[in-house]
Amino acid sequence: MEIKFVEASGEVHHVEVEVGLNAMEAALQNGVPGIDGDCGGNAACGTCHILVDQAWLASLDTTRSEHEEAMIELIENAQPNSRLACQIKLDEALDGLIIHLPEAQF
Amino acid sequence: MNAQAAAEAARVPLADIDVSDPELHRRDVVTEYLRRLRKEAPVHYCANSAFGSYWSVTRFHDIMQVDMNHRQFSSDGTVVIDDQFFSGGHIENEKKRSSFIVLDPPHHTSRRSAVAPGLAPANLLKLEAGIRQRTQELLDSLPVEETFDWVDNVAIELTMRMLAILFDHPFEKRREMLHWSNVVIGFPGDGVVESWEHRNRVMTEIHEYFDRVFKERRANPVGHDLITMLAKSEVMSDLSPAEFLGTMTLLMTGGNETTRNSMSGSVLAMEQFPGELEKLKANPALVPSMVSEVIRWQNPVSYMRRTTTEDVELQGTTIPKGERVVIWYLSGNRDEEVFERPDDFIIDRPNPRQHLSFGFGIHRCLGNRLAEMQLRILWEEILPRFDRIEMVGEPTRIHSNMFRGFHTMPVRLHRKTNA
């Protein structure tokens, strides 16, 4: 399946991803800049903050876990479509998903 | 591994191990005691210490789990082992609930969010050129081929220059902040604080200073400094005087001891692992990765303390309600189940950012990006100037179970041949 990461500068990265990974791993494994993933995917650091493309909000389960919610609450300029990429599990239904990266991770 | 220290740690009966003893930290043998706890008692109970009983959590994933679970492992009131510290019952102008590091949600969230913009990457970009310039000036002023103390002349001096920028404090008065920080974390008889009355006087002086500057900048909020950022926030204006003081002193001390000791730690690491310095010189693009590895390897904050709000089971052990729980970052960062050759400084580890030094969860270090930036700038400016920072004597370590760092570090700079 394919995902599209769009940097804050507008630069686009199309990456081919294995089903079952999360979006943080997808970025790191494909050298997409702008995602750190300091905690390794536990929703404990907030350094894989991304914005889900508006067109995809309907197809994505946007329920945030308590941990994810707590970390997003602390991110400056977080938006209603903010997620932690490590909490987005990639399955076939998300083929073509568009993810926007913030200017920087905090 | 330090074989002598390991043998020493092996001789102590498990139940008698007390990793809160500052002497073990000053002698730098505590890592061997922690290694034993990770192996034999990952959730360990110490019944008797100078600070009362406490539990130690020493494995990487357990530490992360506790750090994320702020409901059952509370920060409310204090995050140090010693219940008397920072309160002591002696100081009328301090309250226990003095800043967001010792608050849980919901109060924690609004207060932390008020401070965050000042330390967010976008704001740090505005401060970077100034920090770089002061770093360059300092490095250019250092004696070459002469012995001097790295801690006082570089690590402390640079940290103070950075704090002066961060708070927009007069450059010539930068050491005033060092004195203030030492008093804030000090106690009578430590060589800085003469008595509780003396500490109280200085705390009042700090409060008056920050209160005056805060009001000035609220009236004229033009700078990018932290106090101006705070002055724009409604939450900050509503804080009680005690909480205002607590927040300002947290920001002042939080970026002081920690960054200073990471800067010195980076020099020690390069001395002990010269191959890594060669790697870095050959490929300066490794600087950011090296910075993360320094922060893991030096581990400037040894632990955080939490308090259980109910009985909690961890690794098959039940920790009762109301107990002190100490999560040892210093131990988790050396967990052999997570890190290959954990004691070694390796600047190109596969996931250098995945360390515990900033903590995890809602209390994760707010100054992490600033700390990384300062260390990055320091080494970006060292590499073109100096071939080597030679250690010409043993560094001396501080007597603290909380901060891992150095009193003195005698060094000699060797100029780069083509520079």
Image (cartoon, coloured by chain):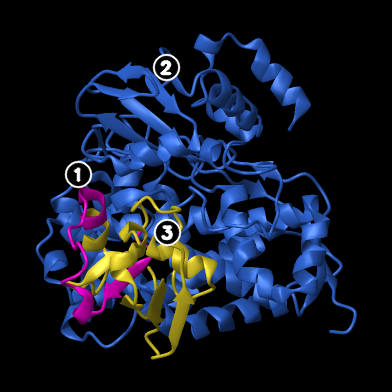
Chain colours: A yellow, B blue
In this rendering, the answer to whether B93 lies above or below B310 is below
In the image, taking residue B150 as reference, residue B30 lies left or right, namely left
Find out whether the residues at labels 2 and 3 contact each other: C-beta distance under 8 Å: no
Which residue, given by chain and number where applicable, does mark 2 sit on?
B45
In this rendering, the answer to whether B223 lies above or below B197 is below
Q: Position of residue B179 (x, y in %)?
A: 45, 56
Q: For residue B97, which numbered disc appears in the image?
A: 1
Q: Residue at x 82, y 65 (%)?
A: B278
SS for callout 2: strand
Closest to the observer, B40 or B106: B40
Q: For residue A21, which numbered disc appears in the image?
A: 3
The amino acid on which the numbered mark 1 sits, given as a three-letter code, is Arg
Q: Residues within 10 Å of mark 2 (few under 14, many from 20)?
A: many
The chain holding disc 2 is B
CA separation in Å, label 1 and label 2: 27 Å
Q: Which residues are magenta?
A: A46-69
